[in-house]
Amino acid sequence: MNELIPSAIAGGIESGRKASNLAFALIALPRKRRRDALVFYRFCRILDDIADSPALAAEEKARALDAWMEALTGGRHLPADLSEVISRHGIDRALLLEILSGVRSDLTVHRYATFEEVRRYCWRVASAVGLASIRIFGCADPASARYAESLGLALQWTNILRDVGEDAANGRIYLPLDELARFGVSESDILAGRSTDSFLRLMEFQADRAGQFFDEARAPRGDRRALRPAEIMRAIYAALLHRMQRDGFRVFARRYRISRPGKLLISARTILNC
């Protein structure tokens, strides 16, 4: 385990495209809190990179994630900077274990039968991240916890919609199978990248659900400034969702993104409004 954890950390959080939205969001934090947030998000990024690595066999991925679980539960071999952040902000390690469980499920679970199953997955890999984040951000209002949970679901559901094509190429379907059946979409349609009228209706339904999660995530007034990073993420992902909707969900043909100038403008507007 001693070898697995440091080798994973070496990659850092700032090396992947998935960290780009985060880089814009964290500019709103004071320097010390930003440093601590980067340590925490590096941990999240490392877990995700292990699960997604094309260079590692499934057994190697499982061993690496198990090493992290042992470090979190046993307290040995946990990186000092992460341990300090956990202690300094009073982060419940149970949240980190939930994140780890969610990521680990990607090794073996490639289909979800119902919305509730997918929602549980989203809570682990996104809402739990948000609940830990608000500790680092310095939130004081208890209502910020519900905000973090709803926003986590909104962001992850948007990710799921954006990545339908990419996930299908890897044999994964995160959209609930019972809802595919309801709209007349088969697993083979998704895996083959068939953008039928039924598929578009399914995606509109899922986009409306993501929109409901965004609507539920209302930052409490007392923590508005502390939640600036989360509000930036909210604005970027809401723009991404709207772009997919306007473009007819061409998720099999392209990967949707917001340009760097667009993110800068969104970040500036959000900071001014918080």
Image (cartoon, rainbow, N blue to C red):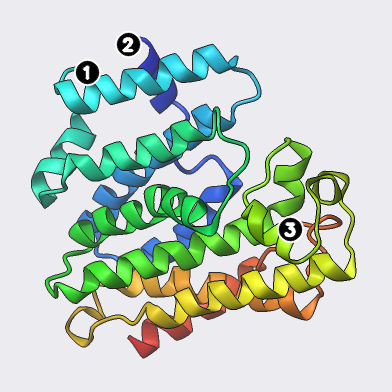
Q: Is residue 254 left or right of residue 20?
A: right
Amino acid, disc 2: Met
Of 266 and 243, nearer the camera is 243
As displayed, is residue 1 above or below residue 187? above
Label 1 environment density (alpha carbons within 10 Å; few <14, some 14–19, many ≥20): some
| Tag shown at residue 1 | 2
Q: Is residue 186 visible?
A: yes
Q: Quadrant of residue 216?
A: bottom left
Taking the spot 29% from the left edge, 25% from the top edge, the residue there is 69
Label 2 environment density (alpha carbons within 10 Å; few <14, some 14–19, many ≥20): some
Residues tagged 1 and 2 counted as in contact (Cβ below 8 A): yes
Residue 63, position in %: x, y?
42, 14
Amino acid, disc 1: His
Q: Is residue 208 left or right of residue 75?
A: right
| Tag shown at residue 77 | 1
Amino acid, disc 3: Ala
Q: Does label 1 or label 3 sit earlier along the sequence?
A: 1
Q: Secondary structure at mark 1?
A: loop
Disc 1 to disc 3, C-alpha distance? 46 Å
Disc 1 to disc 2, C-alpha distance? 8 Å
Indicate which label's residue lies in the foreground, 1 or 3: 3
Q: Which part of the image, by quadrant, shows the N terminus?
A: top left
Indicate which label's residue lies in the foreground, 2 or 3: 3
Q: Does label 1 or label 2 sit earlier along the sequence?
A: 2
| Tag shown at residue 181 | 3
